[in-house]
Amino acid sequence: MGKKETEQPEKPENQENITEQEGTEQATEGTETLNASEVVAKFEALVKELNEKYLRLYAEFDNFRRRTQKEKADLIKYGGEEIILSILPIVDDMERALSHHKDSKDHKPLKEGLDLILQKTKSILTSKGVQAMEPKGETFDPELHDAITNIPATSEDQKGKVAEVVEKGYSLNGKVIRHAKVVVAN
């Protein structure tokens, strides 16, 4: 009997090692779980940060779009301001000329004043890029002229040419802004 009491079931030698390995694996699994949760948290933080950046960028773009639309609308609305400010002194000159003419019996100063006003107007328009078209004698071009009527040509070389200008045409920096109204010889 003494032998049985002292005899304990024998454990394999590597059982202690197995138990130690299981403990280490369990500890490692705990760390892996901790690492995985840290990684998830980092990714969630990164997603949140990128989403905030996206929202800020979208808001900036939206503000830019609105600002450019407003600037475009203002440009269309007030684009002629410079030319109008240039023409207002002419209106003032015409009003002065008409007010002085009421008291005068002589028409010569009125004619001279109107000539000066016309020259001033033409110089302002020229400085802004407006050019008058003088198509008399030129070949009719539907891109530049509006034919009002046709008249019979007196000679062969006049056929298809502008015989008379009823209303001048104008171009602004090379673009036709008003077609000349002309009579064409046929």
Image (cartoon, rainbow, N blue to C red):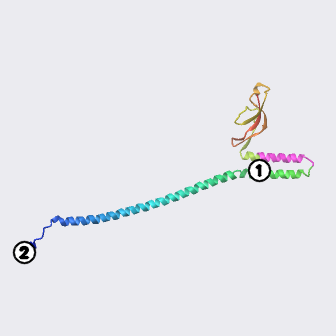
Q: Position of residue 141 (x, y in %)?
A: 71, 33
Magenta span: predominant SS is: helix
Residue situated furthest front in the rendering: 1
Is residue 39 covered in magenta?
no
* Distance from the alpha carbon under mark 1 to that under mark 2: 131 Å
In this rendered view, identify the residue nearer to me: 130 or 18: 18
Q: Is residue 82 above or below residue 160?
A: below
Question: In the rendered image, which residue does mark 1 sit on?
Answer: 87
In this rendered view, identify the residue nearer to me: 123 or 93: 93
Question: In the rendered image, which residue does mark 2 sit on?
Answer: 2
The residue under the point 48% across, 59% down is: 51
Tell which circle, 1 or 2, labels the residue nearer the N-terminal end: 2
Is residue 118 covered in magenta?
yes
The residue under the point 18% across, 65% down is: 15
Q: Relative to 71, is 146 on the left or the right? A: right
Q: Is residue 47 above or below residue 118?
A: below
Q: What is the number of the mark on residue 137? A: none
Query: What segment is highlighted magenta in the picture?
Result: 105-122
Dividing the image into 4 quarters, which one contains the C terminus?
Answer: top right
Identity, as a three-letter code, of the amino acid under mark 2 = Gly
Q: Does residue 136 appear in the picture of this structure?
A: no
Task: Give the crowd class for mark 2: few <14, some 14-19, many >=20 residues within 10 Å.
Answer: few
